[in-house]
Amino acid sequence: MNMPTYVGMPRFPKAAEAQLADQQLRRNLKHATTAIRAKRAAVVNELDDWEGLRNRAADIKAATLAHLDEHLVRFEEQVTAAGATVHWARDATEANATVAELVRQTGESEVVKVKSMATQEIGLNEALAGAGITAFETDLAELIVQLAGDRPSHILVPAIHRNRTEIRDIFLAHMDGAPEGLTDEPAALAEAARVHLRRRFLTAKVAVSGANFAVASTGGLVVVESEGNGRMCLTLPETLISVVGIEKILPTWADLDVFMQLLPRSSTGERMNPYTSIWTGVTPGDGPQNVHVVLIDNGRTNALADDIGRQALRCIRCSACLNVCPVYERVGGHAYGSAYPGPIGAILTPLLRGFSEPADADLPFASTLCGACYDVCPVKINIPEALVHLRAQAVEGGHTGAATKRAGEKSVMKAAELAMSSPGALRAVQVVTGFAGRFVGPTTGKRLPVLSKWVGGRDIPKIPVESFRLWWKRNRS
Amino acid sequence: MRVALFATCFNDTLFPGTPRAVVTILERLGHSVEFPTAQACCGQMHFNTGYQREAIPMVRRFADVFAGYEAVVAPSGSCAGMIRDYHHRVAERADDPGLLSAVEGYSGRVHELSEFLVDVAGVIDVGAHFPHRVTYHPTCHSLRMLRVGDKPLQLLGAVGGIELVDLPAAEECCGFGGTFALKNSAVSMAMAMDKLDNVVATGATYLCASDNSCLMHVGGALSRHGRPVKPIHLAEILAATQLNPFDPNGSS
């Protein structure tokens, strides 16, 4: 099976340029994001106090993160008492090794999977493959991505970059039991996937999931989904292994109430999602009897230590920010080089990975700072604020790119600092040039190398005859 | 009211017609306008590009120059947003409690032009006349940082002779984004072209906004593609009257 990875991805501007050239991709993305934006807006606007809910959610998450150590210990005590085994993993390597060992102990070589961002983040499928274990994705979109040897391009809709004709072709080429003459009708595609997946559910002995929430007071785990494949994986196999980020903790069931109002509306644009599965350890005689929870850090405590960056840990992976982002809408998810694309990915990825991948230094700059993401975020993550904060970390840490480019930008910024801090220097650079028109065409612009990126597509304004301060001096002082 | 004009370094240098238009409007409304000549830059470009320490001297200067004024008016949503939302962060970076308290003192008194006119001066009809077809693009920072809402549209709606037409997908970013326009020029241009299509579809003669930086971006694309729509700052429409109509060559 093809095992795509994010390592060694090209830098964002280059990757984005390649994606922009794909007209089919742009049509697919525009169609999908526009539709989901409208659905979200309708179900958000029908609530009396959406803003109040957002505030409560942000407060609950912030307060929980401030005492995360206590809540995690409480969760461990409760879920252990309920018959589950808790494993702690500092990083992706530890988490993957733990899951592989747990699968090995069952004697199985195949697992079925519930859609999970945490396992995408740690590259679990690839690690399991390395240990001789095949992981089968059962979420329809994850299945499409996996069959095509592709990577997810959206948090909620991993195959958002594919249209139904492409999906039909992928099924016919790669899916066991795809019926001859399969059409691209959504119902036909869903039925073909259902038949294919049903065999997996009925034979699987081990399932791997993530969790949307972990409730500390009882040790309960929660998976929120649409298709019911998750419910199959969470109930039919004998062994269930859940990989859960330590920031998924909520103190109590009352807290969960707030998030169950916010999450479906923000993600799929529904008042309520079709399937919510909740389990607490082992229930004798019912469902998996061998239950494990792998709690992963993988950079989360580093993010927690960052006073501005830590708000990213409130994220509930709804993907509303992706759907409103004008940059995401035009380039899709692959250019971000991470399981977490879009605005949240542009802050979460460098926070979790600490700029360890060179391409991560481009991510905080992959935004116009338009603020549309902050407006829709159900937990009020101020993404623009975190972006500029991480830009400073990238620049000050020397992560911004090739050394010459960095030195070039640094000296320009230094010169501009001097000019822009003093009116005398500012006046000195307000040089006088020609007269005609408000804009100067491409030929003149190209003589100025610093502006070559600008004049590729835009004319530049002519420098005025007289700066405002000279006019003021002449007319008012 | 004694009002200080923060022209912004960008307008001062590249679009001087805009601060001149602000002077015209405010004086016509009976305010005494001061332009403290020691002013320079708000620090936005440096701050937003990751050069936060380099923005410290700019914020210090802003504090020195504008701390004593009752009201400061800036004809730019993004510069006003930088001052109100991020100057305190620069002061924190500078580890300077004196600067921080100065920032806290002035940030509530800094207004983007439409905010000053509607909220502080309490006027909607500023006596302007502009007999042209105009479409308005709400710039991201005026909309989502400052939350000016429909104040610019209220002001434009009261302009004599104007024909205001709705811009499709108005609230979507034009793709400028400061140094984003250079660092990610391909994405920036893709966004500009979508904005351009929407602007052209309105059939407007003028594209109006509260930020000349965004107008420079979309206007540059309009010019490159030979589209006759002309960019114009909100202040320049509000300054125009029947006696002194807008003169594109005279004011820039």
Image (cartoon, coloured by chain):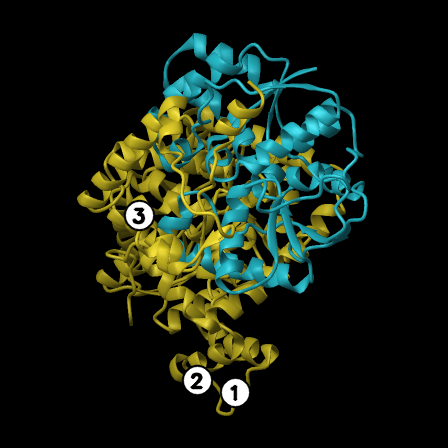
Chain colours: A yellow, B cyan
Residue A439 point in image, percent of width and height: 48, 52
Single out the mark in the foreground, 1 or 3: 3
Answer yes or no: is residue B50 visible.
yes
Residue B209 point in image, percent of width and height: 62, 44
Q: Residue furthest left?
A: A403
Mark 3 → mark 2, Cα distance in angstroms: 51 Å
Q: Which part of the image, by quadrant, shows the N terminus of chain B?
A: top right
Q: Are marks 3 and 2 in contact (CB under 8 Å)?
A: no
Checking the image for residue B220, the label placed there is none
Residue at image position (43%, 84%) is A172
Q: Which residue is mark 2?
A: A172
**Residue type at tag 1:** Leu
Q: Pointer 3: residues within 10 angstroms few (<14), some, or many (20+)?
A: few
Mark 1 → mark 3, Cα distance in angstroms: 54 Å
Q: Which residue is mark 1?
A: A182
- Badge 1 and badge 3 both on one subunit: yes
Chain on which label 1 sits:
A
- Badge 1 and badge 2 both on one subunit: yes
Answer yes or no: is residue A204 visible.
no
Q: Is residue A211 above or below residue B33?
A: below
Chain on which label 3 sits:
A
Mark 1 → mark 2, Cα distance in angstroms: 7 Å
Location of residue B159 (image quadrant): top right
- Badge 3 and badge 2 both on one subunit: yes
Location of residue A394 (image quadrant): top left
Q: Pointer 2: residues within 10 angstroms few (<14), some, or many (20+)?
A: some
Q: Which residue is mark 3?
A: A450
**Residue type at tag 2:** Leu
Q: Is residue A121 left or right of residue A255?
A: left
Q: Which part of the image, by quadrant, shows the C terminus of chain B?
A: top right
